[in-house]
Image (tube, coloured by chain):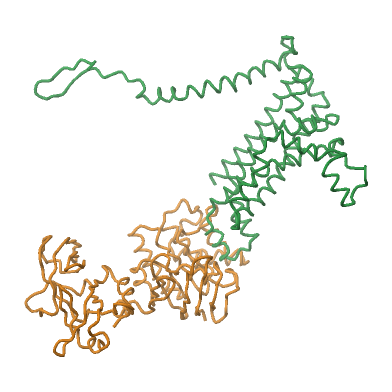
Chain colours: A green, B orange
Amino acid sequence: MATTAVPVPDGGIIVGKPKWRPLESEGNLAMLLLLPTIALLLMFIAYPFMRGILLAVTNSKVGVIGDFVGFENFARLLKDPIFHAVVYNTFLYTFVTTVFKLILGLWLALLLNRDFKFKAFTRAFILLPFIVPTVLACFAWKWMFDPTFSVLNWMLFKLGIVAAGAGVNWLGDGDLAMLSIMIVNIWRGVPFFAISLMAGLQTISPDLGEAAAIDGAKPLQRFWYITWPLLMPVTMVVVLFSVIQTFSDFQIVYVMTGGGPANATHLFATYAYQLGVGTGLLSQGAAVSLAMFPLLFGIVIFQLMYIRRVETR
Amino acid sequence: MSNVTIRQVHKHYADFHAVKGVSLEIKDKEFVVLVGPSGCGKTTTLRMVAGLETISEGDIMIGNKIVNELPPMDRDIAMVFQNYALYPHMTVYDNMAFGLKMRKFDKAEIARRVNNAADILDIKDHLTRKPRMLSGGQRQRVALGRAIVRNPKVFLFDEPLSNLDAKLRVQMRVEIKKLHQRLATTSIYVTHDQVEAMTLGDRVVVMKDGLIQQVGEPLELYNNPANRYVAGFIGSPAMNFADTMIEEVGGAVYATNPTMRIRVPEQIAARMGPHKGKPATLGIRPEDLHMASGADPEDLSFEAVVEVAEQLGAEIILDLKAGGSAMVASVEPTVKVKPQQKIRLGINPAGLRFFDATTEAAI
């Protein structure tokens, strides 16, 4: 015994200095357990974020450290017509694809939630677009959208919709290019919606549907009055995740169009990359990606508040 | 008229024959309980009446109209589920009003009916609450309320008390009984609890393996079980059984085995003709056994060893060993016995029942 025990003659109670055990305090233990996470967060999130902010208020380029210029980079962005297009593109891209991903994903989820043969196989199969590496899938899509050799134009030709040699210039026209990358984003995002919403549907007791059927609700009414409100918390979380992912999307645009034609499909991430890395204007690139932050932050706060309201209802 | 007729109904699943030709006539205003162990087909039968399961064969009629092809909403029934199946995102009021809204009742009429039901069920203070803020008993009242506001032809209950604790179950049982006396709506009630069946049912239907074993008023099932299964299922503690041989000695008929030699009462003995010299199962309820005294004849008593004595206050339940078979007796609370004590038990001859050893049908 390291402590000095003082024997008491008749009581048999041992009195001594208690051992120093700092980890028995919950506060100390919590601190210790949190330490690795805090270190990682500081290194990989806080530092790059601060570095980005510092970069955005200088005029540094590749090879030039640069000087402090205040909000000059942001002021320039406000006057930059490409940046205006980027903001519009990003909101349009996020809104349209999220709506379609939600509708198609919900529809798939409702179908997959039924009992049918090869249910497990189909459910796994549905996930494929989500599992395939995005960049590889995007190269495949790029082929399919090719104006001369693509399977899409070949089909349109065979169906008699377009004349030979007059195929649709999918990625060469600004609007069509935006439509094309939206299609790819939806294709890739639907499985996530379908699987997550299906998991949500499975938490809804089938008894409720039966009770509503006996109560006189037709299938559409059962969906609207029972399933949809009960699925709402899951839906909101899925939409939140998807909005964050889509708003900062990079891979699809970078591989398919590189932001073109004529900047028609640039999003925040691709424009920031092009300015910062492509052109070497590090500070301006940083300013673009930082400009995304308050917008995304606003959307997330709004959605989190809504989720909380739905959940405490 | 809200009578329900079930005629030769079968239910086949892919690899399972769940209901094997059930026929039942339920009269208007009658409370009928389907009781049996899990997997006996009682819930499937109820769900076929509700329209939640398709009918593989046979017909179900509600109010003299075949409803086989009608969806649940057009059958004019209401159902109370085991786990209440309340809509968690709606208030108690909206839960009860939902069926009326779907049927396009006007607002004033909905309010009148919901308030009236809330009065009957004593849940008026909870109308603005969500189901998760209620206790199990209150939730089940809301589920009952949702059923009664619609004023349907038939109530269907699918083990509605199984999720409640023992005390609440007894209380809600009484309330369901009162509710039925007040509303007099034809009711079909499914349970695996024979006490619930006995206390609630005007008639009780005992089912096993997809077949009806016996239909009758509660006391009829208790006193005159049609077969060994019903005899063992109805009554608590359950009826005792002993394997015996039927012998005729000097004009009297005896059921014997190595530990007992019981004289068969004359009115049963008269039916024993074809069973003489063959094995038969003797059945005697625990409440028809008592501590034997000198007045008990030798051939209406037997010896047994006490294993456990359970003091219930109003009675003592004795777990006994008589020869090879376990027996239970319900005796006077004044009886003093110790474990391993050898005692002699007297039989009330009116309580003796006999069952064919192979068909298990009552003799």
Image location of residue B43, percent across then percent down = 46, 67
Image location of residue A84, percent across then percent down = 80, 29
Residue at 75%, 42% in the rendered image = A96
Residue at 87%, 39% in the rendered image = A147
Quadrant placement of the C terminus of chain B: bottom left
Task: Give the answer, above or below, for where A197 lies relative to B291.
Answer: above
Image location of residue A50, percent across then percent down = 63, 18
Viewer-proximal residue, B333 or B95?
B333
Determine if residue B296 is in view.
yes
Q: Residue furthest front?
A: B277
Report whether A14 appears left or right of A115: left
Task: Give the answer, above or below, for where A90 lies relative to B288.
Answer: above
The quadrant where residue A299 appears: top right
Residue at 67%, 15% in the rendered image = A54
Number of marks = 0
Determine if residue B4 is in view.
no
Report whether B340 appears left or right of A210: left
Task: Give the answer, above or below, for where B30 lies relative to B191.
Answer: below
Viewer-proximal residue, A259 or B28?
A259
Q: Residue furthest left?
A: B294
Image location of residue B127, percent across then percent down = 50, 57
Report whether A25 appears left or right of B302: right
Viewer-proximal residue, B356 or A21?
B356
